[in-house]
Image (cartoon, grey):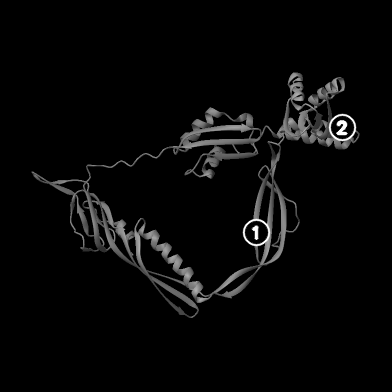
Amino acid sequence: MRGPIEYIKGDVRIQVECKYPERFINICAREGVAFKELTRNENVSEMTVSIGGYRKLREVSRKTGIFTVKPVERHGVPFLLWRVRKRYALLAGLILCLGAVWFSSFFIWQIDVEGNETVPTWQILSCLKKLGVDIGSSTLSISQARLSNEMLLMIPELSWITLNTHGSRLEVLVREETPKPELIDESVQTEVYAGKAGIITDITVNQGVAQVSEGDTVVQGDMLIAGEIIGFHGAIPVRADGEIWARTWYELTLEMPLETVEKRYTGESTTRTAIIIGGKRLNLYFSSGNPYAFYDKITTYDQATLGDAVLPFTVVKDTYQEYEPVSVTLAQDTAQRILSARLLWILEQQIGEGTVVSTEYQSAENNGVLQVTLRAECTEQIGESRAVGDDTQDSVQEGEN
């Protein structure tokens, strides 16, 4: 890809025929002729050189006769100006256009944010806008040190930020702060209780005293591990810790109407084009109403560029695809498979790292609505921690089946 500077200077794609290609390469090195995009086929080579390089090679070819050189393609502003040299209005428009492109390179027309994972891009862009950096801002007004320091104060989740300008494109590179480990207050006495009802299958106590044994049945809220240890002078309060695995049972229900509506595309579509300049949208169409009664709308944004230079406008295309809503009746077994898969997914989210031991599905259809019930047996870790004396048990409520 040619950059804007290369396009302004111009280059020539040449074809060289030489019996000794290596000798021709040595001539290029001696004459200081740089080339790129070299392709070779026996004694014939093709490469791209500058206009000055092409003139040097043509002169050497004429004097030595060692090789022949001829142009294949010409690119760039010099050749364009030569072709339009007698079309004064077109030449003036071209000069004005190039001047506008050069002038626009002093403003930001595209902002790219890289390196963020948890901090949303919109938050970074919003903070930059508050600091005066936005689409259309002058690149000359960007102070790297000032913006970096103020951005770190505005977004504490960032540990490092730098801003680089590439023509009209602003590149924002960030690094997020490494999350600090949660500090545990060892002075707070806690106990482990049952977040769900079940039958205990395995107990692992890291600290504290187990209050249940394998095979015991517990209900939600029962204490599983007491927050104390027995010493020579009696009970000593500690932070209870451990894992309690149990068999648990679930009953979940979902329903779905068998009569549903699907989209049937007609194949008709229309595209409307607009241009966004400096945040203002300029529609290149006259009709503003909806083209179809039922349609899907797909919008694409294409930032205009010239080589590596970003131009100050974005081309927006809205594509409308027409469809007809068609009423269809799902087969009962198809609907049952859909609901069964959803129920199993919901169950797996509720048990986390647990295991589904067995499942049983029951379905019933009533007035065109299919209802599917899942009954399942699982094995999961039911122990949850709370401070001794904390009776709110908010987490207990969250663990209800």
x, y (%) of residue 10?
Answer: 78, 30
x, y (%) of residue 341?
Answer: 45, 66
Q: Which-is-in-front pick, marks 2 and 1?
A: 2
Q: Which amino acid does label 2 sit on?
A: Trp
Residue topped by disc 1:
297
In this orientation, does residue 203 appear?
A: yes
x, y (%) of residue 371?
Answer: 44, 74
Cα distance, mark 2 to mark 1? Answer: 45 Å
Residue topped by disc 2:
82
Secondary structure, mark 1, is: strand
In this orientation, does residue 400 appear?
A: no
Is the residue 316 above or below the residue 46 in the image? Answer: below
As rendered, which of 307 and 69 lies closer to the eye?
69
- For the residue carrying disc 2, how many other residues have a C-alpha within 10 Å: few (<14), some (14-19), or many (20+)? few
Q: Which residue lies furthest to the bottom in this view?
A: 367
As rendered, which of 275 and 382 lies closer to the eye?
382
